[in-house]
């Protein structure tokens, strides 16, 4: 009886080694096998299929809005969260940091950081609450009141710029739809 097991093992080892070598120089992705040695990055990415994903579109728009907002108020170090907090404090003198956290849907330490930055900028003042010395009531300083007026005008201009492609009726409809989605 002829025993071919050593030859079969040798052939299997060679096949495994060849497969391992091929794997080292190729990548298998959703679109197929890519030879790493002949690889060059695609010059134009195909993202058209992503346009049907609501989350993708919202994230892209959020990135666009955020970048525009920062360029509008960059020299004053006012981010969307700081502007929102400042606006809430202006409309609600005596509000607490916990209320800011709730309104922004962020953790309390994040709200503390935002408020502390606004205090350091001289835009917000804190006042002790007699019933609880650990909590401070927040109010705009005179500087904060004046700056908020300027910030609101800049933000309105920024939003007009972002929404320029939409007629007023579509912008109002978009706002209604966003409020509806956020209410749920």
Image: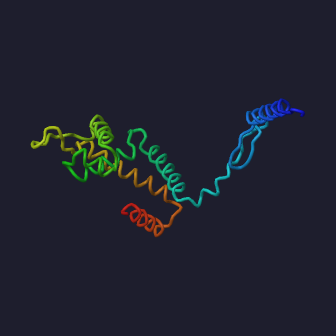
As drawn, which residue projects farthest toward the front?
A: 1
Q: How many marks?
A: 0
> Is 58 above or below relative to 29?
below
Q: Quick one: which residue is furthest to the left in this view? A: 130
Residue 136 placement: quadrant: top left
- Residue 169 point in image, percent of width and height: 46, 70
In this view of the protein, which residue sits in the foreground, 149 or 135? 135
Q: Is residue 26 left or right of residue 137?
A: right
Outermost bottom residue: 169
Q: Residue at x 48, y 55 (%)?
A: 161
Quadrant assignment for the N terminus: top right
Q: Give the percent coordinates (x, y) of residue 99.
A: 25, 49
Which residue ends up furthest to the right in the rendered image?
A: 2
Q: Nearer the viewer, residue 16 or 178?
A: 16
Q: Percent position (x, y) of residue 53? A: 56, 59
Quarter of the C terminus within the rendering: bottom left
User: Whole-percent x and y of residue 86?
Assistant: 30, 47
Which residue is painted at 20% across and 40% down in the image?
A: 126
| Picture layout, residue 20 above or below residue 176 | above
Please indicate whether residue 139 sits to the left or right of residue 56 in the image: left
Side of 21 relative to 166 (left or right): right
- Give the colour scheme of this rendering: rainbow
In front of the other: 2 or 114: 2
User: Is residue 67 toward the left or the right of residue 109 in the image?
Assistant: right
Residue at image x 17%, y 38%? 134
Identify the residue at image location x=30%, y=47%: 101
């Amino acid at each position: 009886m002829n025993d071919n097991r050593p030859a079969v093992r040798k052939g299997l080892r060679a096949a495994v080694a060849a497969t391992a070598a091929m794997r080292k120089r190729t990548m298998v992705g959703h679109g197929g096998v890519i030879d790493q040695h002949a690889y060059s990055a695609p010059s134009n990415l195909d993202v058209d299929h992503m346009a049907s994903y609501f989350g993708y579109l919202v994230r892209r728009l959020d990135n666009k809005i955020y970048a525009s907002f920062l360029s509008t108020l960059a020299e004053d170090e006012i981010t969307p969260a700081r502007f929102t907090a400042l606006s809430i404090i202006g409309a609600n003198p005596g509000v607490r940091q916990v209320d800011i956290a709730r309104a922004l849907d962020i953790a309390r330490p994040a709200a503390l950081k935002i408020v502390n930055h606004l205090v350091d900028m001289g835009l917000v003042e804190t006042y002790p609450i007699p019933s609880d010395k650990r909590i401070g009531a927040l109010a705009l300083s005179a500087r904060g009141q004046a700056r908020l007026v300027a910030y609101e005008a800049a933000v309105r201009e920024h939003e007009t710029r972002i929404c320029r492609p939409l007629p007023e009726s579509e912008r109002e409809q978009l706002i209604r739809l966003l409020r509806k989605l956020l209410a749920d």
